[in-house]
Image (spheres, rainbow, N blue to C red):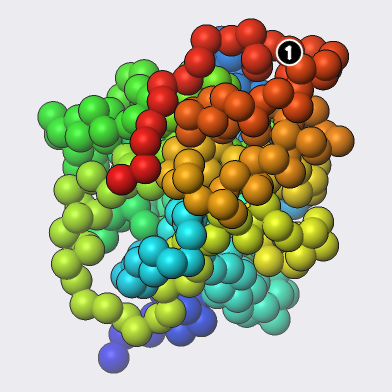
Amino acid sequence: MPVASYEDELRSVGLAAGLDAVGVAPAAPFLGTRRHLEERKAAGLHGGMQFTYRRPERSTDPSATLKGARSLVVGARGYRRPSPPSAAASAGPTATVARYARHDHYGDLRGGLDAVAVRLRADGWQARVVLDDNALVDREAAYRAGLGWYGKNTNLLLPGRGSWFVLGSVITDAPLEPAAVPVADGCGPCRRCLDACPTGAIVAPGVVDARRCLAWLVQAPGDLPREHRVAIGDRIYGCDDCQEVCPPNRRQDRGADDGAPPGEAVVAVLGVLDATDDELLERHGRWYIPERNPRYLRRNALVVLANVGDPTAPAVIAALRRYLASPDPLLRAHAAWAARRLGRPELLAVLADDDDPAVRAELAAPAPPGRTHR
């Protein structure tokens, strides 16, 4: 029997620890990626997003995280799970959560990468795990490690398995043999993700304007842009539309269920609006919440309430009244939008003497498209 290479041994360690794919890439700087980040940031396409845009010189250079870095061991862990049955109508309006955020998939990914790092350290090498932070552009590392190709929606697609994966790396000074060649593009002429985006945020193949991307907007600080609030629909965190229509993902959806729990696919909108700060952070603290301030979860919930709530339901009206009297002008302004969207302008009388600029601007703006409960 041939002796397995060290790279194969590391791959086996990662797979045994729960990773679905493992590859190796050189730790040379991602010069092209840095250029793209800087160009798109200069054009405003980052929409104020920080993450790897904050310091491109760091997030595209593994040696900025580990001095003397020579290799990356890159891992992927799948997060596609069947959705649970829809919540009962009696539970009130519900909001959807993007698939990657329904469970701590990054925690599971870290466990697999940690196992690889432990093996490297045991063999005398330095190793640093990085994932879902500002330290490294995970998709570029995975592309260089031969795990997949870039889709037109900028997600990385694994051959035969699609893009329902979280990604991360172990940066090491071990001199590992990298993947021979990158995975060839598998999208061809398909443009379903571009056509399905609710706000047209995929402005060109491989280019996303974060100022229109719902997945970013519900995480961004400040007001939710008025022109995109209707498109938010029932999303309280994340957006999966461009992945849901992707043919490789749809084929994967027909595959066997691995038996893992689906996680929290929906949350009760009124529950979010009724909860205390501590309760919201305890329930949803692993989500990215701007400034760790639960006001932004409530902001999102008010927009969802306007889009899916029953304007005749006493609990909905009570929530609107409460937030129209909120001491937080951000929430008063979004509650005003919600009341107008739900066709309850009589509730706005409480704001007649409100002198906050954001609230006055909301009241002066054109009324949002109305809707009726069915």
The residue at 63%/60% (across/down) is: 271
Identify which residue, 172 or 41, lies in the foreground. 41
Q: Position of residue 291 (x, y in %)?
A: 80, 42
The residue at 24%/54% (across/down) is: 249
The residue at 64%/41% (across/down) is: 320
Examine the rendering and report whether any part of residue 131 can be seen. Answer: no
Identify which residue, 5 or 297, lies in the foreground. 297
* Quadrant holding the C terminus: top left
Identify which residue, 164 or 59, lies in the foreground. 164
Examine the rendering and report whether any part of residue 198 can be seen. Answer: yes
The amino acid type of the residue labelled 1 equals Arg
Q: Position of residue 125 (x, y in %)?
A: 70, 69
Q: Position of residue 80 (x, y in %)?
A: 36, 65
The residue at 82%/62% (across/down) is: 278
How crowded pointer 1 is (Cα within 10 Å; few <14, some 14-19, many 20+) is rated as some
374 relative position to 25: left or right: left
Q: In the picture, residue 63 is in which quadrant?
A: top right
Identify which residue, 202 or 352, lies in the foreground. 352
Q: Is residue 273 above or below residue 73?
A: above
Q: In the picture, residue 353 is in which quadrant?
A: top right
Return the residue found at the far left.
189
Give the number of callouts.
1
97 relative position to 371: left or right: right
* Quadrant holding the N terminus: bottom left
Kind of element beneath mark 1: helix
Q: Position of residue 329 (x, y in %)?
A: 80, 28
Q: Is residue 231 above or below residue 241?
A: above
Q: Is residue 233 above or below residue 348?
A: below
The residue labelled by disc 1 is: 360
Return the residue found at the far bottom.
1
63 relative position to 7: left or right: right
Q: Is residue 101 above or below residue 205?
A: below
